[in-house]
Image (tube, helix red, strand yellow):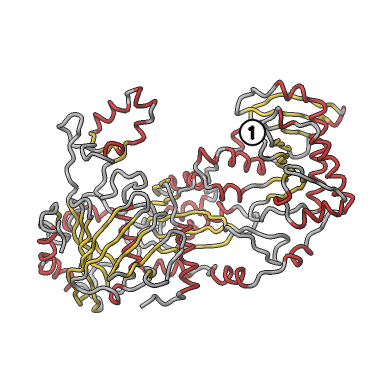
Amino acid sequence: MFTNVEKGNQGLCKYCGKKLAPKEMLAHLVKCEKRDEKIYAAKKEMEGFFDILITSKEMEDYWMIIEVNEKTMLKEIDTFLREIWLGNEQCLSIFKIKNLKYKYISGGNLLYVEPEQSMYHTLKNILSVGETFDYTYGENKITEIKLMVFSHRIGRRHEEEDIVLLSRNIPPERICYKCKKNNASWVDTIIYSFDDDAFLCDECKEKVESNKLFIQMEYTENMLPIYNSPRMGIGDYEGSDFYTDEFKPDFENKERQKNKPKKVEKKTLKKFKNNQYDVYPIMKEWESEYTVSEKVESKRELPTKEAWMELYEVAERIKKFKAWEYVYEFQIISLKVKGEETIFYSILGEDEKEYGVDVYEGYDDFKTFIVNDYSEALDLPKGYVKSLKSNLACRWGNVEDLSKDQRDTIKELGFKYKGKGKWLYFTSFEKGYSPYSLDRDEVAHMTKHLKNLEIILEKFEDNIRESINMDFDELMCVEYIKDNNEWKFYIEKIPLEEYSLSNEKIKDKNKLNRLKEAPKVESVLDVDIIPLKRTINDEKYIKPITPFIYGIVDAKSGDLISSKIAEPGADVGDLLVEEIERFIDEVGRPRIIRTANELINSKLSLICENLDINLSLKKSSRVGKKFGEYMVYKKEIGNTPLN
């Protein structure tokens, strides 16, 4: 049945600690007296459970045995495997049972067409004792796993979880390939891709990392910790936050249990989840009943033809300076006028791809430029960064870049543009809204800002040309002194403290003390903010919106326990913090909060430090995928799992 069942690495029994190989362990668990005692002592209703052996096809040392409630859905086993062995939620995974494929594609793209099924099937309807089936994870670097249903019992539930780890292989010993004597803690992923002799101890790793040649080649980035997983040595696997590599029987864990955070009951999580509005009806309404854009447009105060003409004329005068020939878009010009917000200009066109001027009104708007500028270094998703933009934009583009409104404005003004990069248009970017044409106030503001830029380019072109070699943390500052009509030009440091990543602090001492007193629970939460990738016309708002979804996933169950829609313009980071605080109030302080977003990580750092919560920055987030999956589940299945 399984070629590696008899010769596999040994593991320990959860109940009595007996050390056995996989096949022997399966037989032992059926008759383990300690297990029977625990089941008998449980005061629960009778239910059905499967014992399933899980083993790696390629790496026979890795195996485990789980007990699963027969009412559990296949998707929950997928979540369990990802959490204990596999990691990255973005990867495709497939179960193959009786020639049927049960498929999960990240983002909630679930397939229902035969022979490919969704994973929303309960085990009792698709599995039977003796059944052997396959599981595949990954796309480029695939991990293949085999599962076997060894036994089925009708009895009492003795653990809160639907999936209980009964036994797991003892971590294989790895000897350092350099010194040949110490136990290894690290794997060289490059060598490991073609040779099993690729493990290093801490001492030898330090020697390798101090080698200048290796540092120059960025060789040290290929070192990863050794984990008790067939996914070890693959870049997207970062270990488990729930399951230690070394499996311990219950009696050895008793001392640890004393100080261990308490378990969260399903009903507690369900109550937390239910104490909020369901976003699905809102999303469904947006999907099925589009509000015509004319109704949205009617609420806006539109510019007059004369106001548009004045703006177009000053923009065409700006174009004649060809400032993009000597200024890069990251070389910022700021304008300071006493009593007014500082205005920041970014001139685009040095790459000859897009010509224009971006205007940021005030420090808050300019912060979105800084975030965009550092987005690659912070590894922020492009869609997320784009959705945060807040500025007025002037562009010379192609006709296909323009909306119908923008083309109509040009036609009304009598301008005739031909050729690529010749069509002048203006766009407003605002957090939570879709990029849109300017309203009356925005046209007035943009006209004023471009007129001031015209003065700056006339007066200080030589100064600007001489400043092109300024440091990355400097900007060209122009100051206008109204009292004596004086203009000054100088270089100054960007006040980076204004743009440093936000560290949120709970200022309300009563709230802080209340949250500190909340019980510590074993929950691990995945949190994230996701911009909805669509434009929505809703007559409630003055222009089309692109909302942010913020949410929380219970990492162990894979359940989306919170998902909400932020109002346009709202600080969605603050809203996410409020939702985490609600979790702490209603459930308890989680053991770990995980995010893949550096901005969220920074915002939560002080809060987590004050509340003794471990904050973890991961390579990917599960919130967006779980939200997409939830929406498809509600749409295709409703509240009833497939049979």
Amino acid on which disc 1 is placed: Phe
Point out residue 463 in the picture as x, y percentages from the top left corner: 75, 22
Classify 305 as above or below 1: above
Q: Quadrant of residue 195?
A: top left
| Residue closest to the far right | 306
Q: Is residue 527 or residue 87 the one in the foreground? A: 87
Q: Taking 599 as reference, is 642 above or below it?
A: below
Q: Secondary structure at mark 1?
A: loop
Please state which of residues 267 and 296 is positioned toward the viewer in this rendering.
Answer: 296
- Left or right relative to 258: residue 611: right
Horizontally, is 526 left or right of 572 in the view?
left
Q: Which residue is mark 1?
A: 330
**The one of 290 and 367 positioned closer to us in this rendering:** 290
Q: Specify the quadrant that holds the N terminus.
A: bottom left
The image shows residue 270 at horizontal and vertical percentages of 42, 69
Please report the residue visible at 39 percent of the width from the left and 72 percent of the height from the top.
114
- How many residues crowd mark 1 within 10 Å: few (<14), some (14–19), many (20+)? some
Query: Can you tell which quarter of the image residue 37 is in?
Result: bottom left
Number of marks present in the image shown: 1
* Res. 254 visible in picture: no
Give the residue at x 33% y 73%. Answer: 122
Instruction: Answer with left or right where residue 316 lies relative to residue 464.
Output: right
- Across and down, in percent, residue 465 comes to 72, 23
Measuring 10% from the left and 64% from the top, which residue is drawn there?
A: 28
Q: Residue furthest front?
A: 419
Is residue 11 visible in this depiction of the protein?
A: yes
* x then y, percent, for residue 284: 57, 71
Q: Quadrant of the C terminus?
A: bottom left
